[in-house]
Image (cartoon, helix red, strand yellow):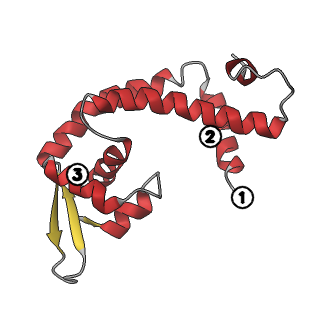
Amino acid sequence: MKIEEIIKSNSPISIEKRTVLNIMFTQNVIADAFNDILKSFDLSVEQFNVLRILRGQKGKPANMCVIQERMIAKTSNTTRLVDKLLLKDLVIREVCEENRRKMEITITEKGLKLLAELDPKIEAHETLFSTNLSSEELENLNNLLEKYRTI
């Protein structure tokens, strides 16, 4: 369905505005479906992102700066996110031995098990949104999006 039909626009929309609206609308559709998956696990998208970052550390701790750098949503309050994950026993926080002002965060076994349970659901979610496009079209879309956000 065309974006003009979705937003019920009666007047012409410039190609630039149409593009932005399409990207924003599509992002919301994807995010809504993603949030539905995470809701049953009592996780926010940002908390999930932190857990994925920590799993990628392969057992090594990450400090708050490393986590913040790798976040998809750069405006996230990393300290608050880690605090919530601590309460759920999904991460542990320890003082860095070399620099006592730094906190090091590590994913727990419970956090790893949660991600392992989520992995197939997330993979199915990603596949669902890719089914209408060929591999070549997906590659093209990625290239165009990367080009589009380079200002």
Q: Which residue is mark 1?
A: 151
Q: Amino acid at mark 2?
A: Asn
Q: Amino acid at mark 3?
A: Lys
Q: Which residue is mark 2?
A: 142
Secondary structure type for disc 1: loop
Quarter of the image holding residue 60?
bottom left
First reached walking from the N terminus: tag 2 or tag 1: 2
- Split into 4 quadrants, where in the image is the C terminus? bottom right
Image coordinates for residue 79, horizontal then vertical, percent = 29, 62
- C-alpha distance separating marks 3 and 2: 33 Å
Quarter of the image holding residue 92?
bottom left
Q: Is residue 106 left or right of residue 145?
A: left
Residue in the picture at 66% in, 29% down: 137
Q: Which of the pair 52/136 is nearer the observer?
A: 52
Q: Is residue 75 left or right of residue 101?
A: right
Q: Which residue is mark 3?
A: 84
Q: Which of the pair 48/139 is nearer the observer?
A: 48
Q: Which of the pair 8/26 is nearer the observer?
A: 8
